[in-house]
Image (cartoon, grey):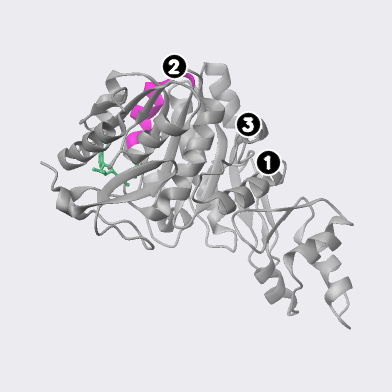
Amino acid sequence: MVNQALLEEIAEGKVSYLVPTDYNRKGPGRRTGGVFYNRQMQFNRDVCISFIDAVCRKGCRILDAMGATGIRSARIAVETARDMDITCNDSSTEAVELMRLNFSRLGLDEVTVSRRRAQALLSEEHFDYIDIDPFGTPVSFIPSALLSARNRGVIAVTATDAAVLCGSARGALRRYLCRPLRAPFMHEIGLRCLAGYIVRMAASYDLAATPLLSYFADHYFRLYVRIERGTLKAERSLGMIGYAHHDPVSGERTVDRTPSSGAAGPLWIGPLHDRETLSGMHVREWFGTYVRMERQMKIWREECIAPPLHYSMDELASRLKISMPERDSLMDYLSSLFPVYRTHLDPKGIRTAATLREVEEAILKKYGGGRGAY
Ligand code: SAM
């Protein structure tokens, strides 16, 4: 039985919700009373609501495979415009009791509650949208999620083992079959490593996986991928698997289909987001992270057409030994010379197809004082 004395009511999105009293409002979430709630993941859930509203049609079968308190499912039921068939699952008895209590308070009788190992449930049923939000790595859930997804369905995956994906902790090769890279753009490598892993796993089942939205936020990576059946499509998706090369001396970076010694990969070298999906997503006025989401959406839209492997202004400043202007001024100036884009991966990051040498020469010319280029 849920001990209601250990619960407190919070508001998130359009729902009032009971969560364990000592959840941590700022830092990483805690598992008090066996049920997990992390206030900081509100951004993750706001994006999820907006994504589902844009992509999932009436009657879609939705699986919240690791529901914990069930707040994501409750918000999908209350905040999205269409009637959808939602299943909220968690392997923990306490979690299932708490989600039942909350759904009943909110009158959400239509949400199916399930207490299964997600892998078992996924191996038996098919869904149009599958949310995988585990503690740490999602790898043990990917094969069953891929096989459970209906044709043109979506898998949404959170990975909180960012240190592994970025190469600051060991294990990326073992876990994701991908060599990471310690470089100023390591978060981009981590994100592409995760996307590449899902695309390659999918291809092995004759499925094509295409990233629709991919981001890094706070301490985790999050990916929404479209799954399509077909050998040819699967083969074609592998065309976007490649390697990232970085010369630590010249600083130059490139992506390529073929590996070289020390290259990161195999990883996804295609677009991180799908422009059409993003244009269908709306930032709702009731979202707790409205301002943050508006800002991110603008940058994600910009990133859709931007080349991979960004430059960091801190890296440029330290290489050129000059102090940098604000990013907006620098981008205004550079955009008069070649196309430049922001990246959500670094508040001081710049994406461009220009080489590092071209970027540095341009910067030295304007901001280098007496220093000549190269
Ligand atoms: N999605 C939730 C949210 O938005 O608040 C948070 C999920 S929490 C990070 C991870 C949850 O996964 C825990 O509640 C845990 O009990 C559950 N879990 C762990 N292993 C599982 C498994 N194999 N199958 C189903 N649930 C699992």
Label 1's element? loop
Q: Is residue 142 magenta?
A: yes
Badge 2 residue CB within 8 Å of ligand 1: no
The residue lying toward the viewer, choosing from 288 and 53, is 288
**Residue 33 relative to residue 363: left or right:** left
Percent coordinates x, y for residue 107 in the rendering: 30, 29
**Residue 38 relative to residue 277: left or right:** left
Q: Which segment did they paint magenta?
A: 141-152
At label 3, counting other C-alpha atoms closer than 10 Å, the crowd grade (few under 14, some 14-19, many 20 or more) is: few
Give the residue type at disc 1.
Answer: Cys
Quadrant showing the C terminus:
bottom right
Indicate whether 76 appears above or below 182.
Answer: above
Please report the residue visible at 47 percent of the width from the left and 57 percent of the height from the top. 218
Q: Which residue in the protein does label 1 denote?
A: 304
Percent coordinates x, y for residue 205 in the rendering: 43, 23
Q: Which residue in the protein does label 2 denote?
A: 59
Indicate whether 24 appears above or below 49.
Answer: below
Which numbered disc, 1 or 2, marks the residue that appears first in the sequence? 2
At label 2, counting other C-alpha atoms closer than 10 Å, the crowd grade (few under 14, some 14-19, many 20 or more) is: few
Percent coordinates x, y for residue 105 in the rendering: 26, 35
The residue lying toward the viewer, choosing from 310 and 295, is 295
Mark 3 to mark 2 CA distance (whole Å): 19 Å
